[in-house]
Image (cartoon, rainbow, N blue to C red):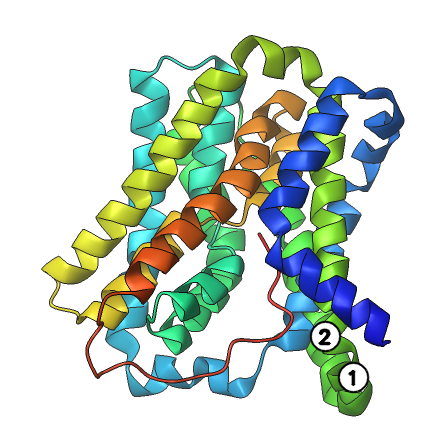
Amino acid sequence: MKVLEALSAVAGKYFAVWVILISVIAFIFPEPFLGLGGYITILLGVVMFGMGLTLKAVDFKIIITKPLPVIIGVCAQFIIMPIVAFLIAKLMNLPAELAAGLVLLGCVPGGTASNVMVYLAKGNVPLSIAMTSVSTLLAPIMTPLLLLLLAGQWMPVDFFDMFKSIVQVILLPIVLGLAIKRFFPVAVEKSLTVLPLISVAAIITIVSAVVSGNAASIAASGFLIFTAVMLHNGFGLLFGYLAAKGLGLDEVNRRAISIEVGMQNSGLGVALATAHFGPLAALPSVLAAAWHNISGPILATYWSKKHAGDSIEEAPVHPAETKL
């Protein structure tokens, strides 16, 4: 168990390195990974099951006690990122499948790696966790609805089919995780330290499957879409911060909302793109899985050295944070 815990810590700490490494390997030697594409949905379900195991009632306390920052943050999440993705796709004149994939990345909920980044940035961790949870629970409605409005010009969007997919790969695994934790709390508590290892293994397997299946497309348009992903993430971080500042929130809340808005659930983006748009549409989410875990620590390190005020609410970060 000690060995697994050590491996889990290393896997979580150097997640971006593993994503970049497996991406390069799968790009150069795609054949061994080509058969993994059929397991993407199952693997994402495993990651979301882990999220369900880590959720606690205290995570939702801020929604009742201080709902305004949560409302502002979730609204910013589902307004800023989809619109920015749409505008970038238009201005850069991306091919249809890549454009739809970038908009899809903008329409998915926040990723849970953001919780760790907010903690490192001395932001409001309870707000970050609440935003991740609420945006994830709203995803079955908001993600297909936003895609229908913004991505329909590039690719056909089936609202109800996508709604069903998100319920299957997000909500059901989370509910199952909550149920397992409710009835087997001791066993779950003992397993939490190895969950990052499982989550990271699942995500890098998803990344390897998509990269190997799109090696030729990456060679042709990888730089273009990577630029789009970087711009999308950068504008999300900036506009999330400015939205929170403009609405009168303090510094710790601004930092939390900035990082939450800027970092997306790229694993869900990969799964939905592969299932509903095609493998090429998954490329923006694959690149985001790496880039978000590079830009996030850079920003968190910068903010960690700057005073954020005294209004921060302390809360422990879950030991099983997944890197999405």
Instruction: Name the mark on residue 296.
Output: none
- Residue 92 left/right relative to 220: left
Instruction: Name which residue lies at 57% across and 76% down.
Output: 318
- Residue 156 left/right relative to 208: left
Name the residue tied to disc 2.
193
Name the residue tied to disc 1.
190
Q: Position of residue 259 (x, y in %)?
A: 36, 56
- Residue 50 left/right relative to 80: right
- Cα distance, mark 2 to mark 1? 7 Å
CB atoms of marks 2 and 1 within 8 Å: yes
Type of amino acid under label 2: Thr
Q: Quadrant of residue 103?
A: top left
Instruction: Name which residue lies at 64% across and 59% down.
Output: 12
Q: Is residue 299 visible to the viewer in this orientation of the structure?
A: yes
- Residue 27 left/right relative to 323: right
Q: Position of residue 83 (x, y in %)?
A: 30, 36
Q: Is residue 163 visible to the viewer in this orientation of the structure?
A: no
Instruction: Name which residue lies at 78% across and 84% down.
Output: 190
Q: Where is 126 relative to 300, above or below?
A: below
Query: Which of the two residues, 216 or 43, is positioned nearer the viewer here?
Result: 216
Q: Where is 220 relative to 309, above or below?
A: above
